[in-house]
Amino acid sequence: MIISIGLLVLSLGIILAGAELFTNGIEWFGRKLQLAEGAVGSVLAAVGTALPETMIPIIAILFGKGAHSEEIGVGAILGAPLMLSTLAMFVTGLAVLIFARTRRRSSEMRVDHKVLGRDLRTFFVVYVLAIGASFLPGRPYKVAAALVLIGLYVYYVRQTFRGVIGEGHGHELGRLHFHRRAEVPRLRVVVTQVFAALVCIIVGAHLFVQNLSHIATVLGMSAFVLSTIVTPIATELPEKFNSVTWVRKKKDTLALGNISGAMVFQSSILPALGLMFTPWVLSRDALATAVVALVAAGVISAEMAIRKRVSPFTLLLGIVFYAAYLVYVFAFEH
């Protein structure tokens, strides 16, 4: 048990190190392609920071061994939108208020509503489709639903890139880790770092799945619940602190786009994987996870629609929704 916990911590360290390399590399890749702020925030940074969480269900479902692998995979898939729409939004809202308190910025958030609105609308469509697909009667229907989800994400990416053509990209990048002496690294060095990061993340994810499964067995706890709570917090929430950095620099569109873009990715591509490679019959706990995520995102979307703005105080409500989910889970956990 102690060894498994130690290996679990080690695997998280490997995953997060790989995520840092990947995020740093993919942002430089975006700079090389002259991509604008909306595309970097909602697509490249969002997918890049979501990669550790993405690899957990892929490894668990496609290559996992043992009775708990599928539960871990599905738990990781559904846990990500929950964490992003609650804890990640809470951290961002809290950061705005803290920086406003220290007079580094105002408490008013300046967000491109076109970018965030598109992200949230797409999230509702794809996530409702993904959850609704669990009630479809046969595998061919679920595979068809998976293809629709992938198509919708491709369309979303296309619209995001189309919507930012001609805009500036004022985000600042740290130096490339694989070539810190160069102010502007060569493309081949950037690509090398990205591939090295992928190797780290895949190795770490494989180790993570093995040891989380063992810990769930020893504790007699549902692997689904353990994966829903532990996996997204450990693998993705630390990376979402990128949003805190962007909030401090008054880049609110990047900060929220980093989260909302990841929500779209995590609620479309990963459920598509679940639909194609698992029975995708969701339990009561799984449905509760989805409902909380949708309600939390719905509150933010409603404020945008009614008041034409996003308040940091609304983002703080995310912790309330997440706490309610934890109460529900542990109240009904056997």
Image (spheres, rainbow, N blue to C red):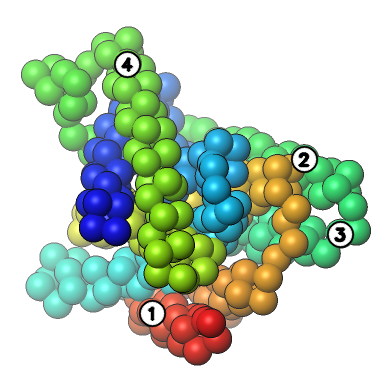
Query: Rounded to the nearest whole Å, what is the CA distance between mark 4 and mark 3?
Result: 43 Å
Give the amino acid at mark 1: Ile
* Residue wearing tag 1: 319
Place of residue 47 in the rendered image (x, y in percent of width and height, measured from the top left): 46, 41
Q: Is residue 321 visible?
A: no
Distance from Cα at disc 3 to Cα at disc 1: 33 Å
Q: What residue type is labelled 3?
A: Leu
Q: Position of residue 259 (x, y in %)?
A: 43, 56
Q: Work out whether mark 3 precedes mark 1 in sequence or the reverse, and give the earlier one.
A: 3
Q: Residue 186 vs residue 224: left or right?
A: left
Are the residues at dot 4 and dot 3 in contact (C-beta closer than 8 Å)? Answer: no
Q: Give whichever of discs 4 and 3 has the lower sequence position.
A: 3
Mark 2 lies on residue: 147
Return the residue at label 3: 136
Q: Position of residue 12 (x, y in %)?
A: 29, 47
Looking at the picture, which amino acid does disc 2 mark?
Leu
Report crowding for label 2: few under 14, some 14 to 19, many 20 or more residues within 10 A (C-alpha).
Answer: some
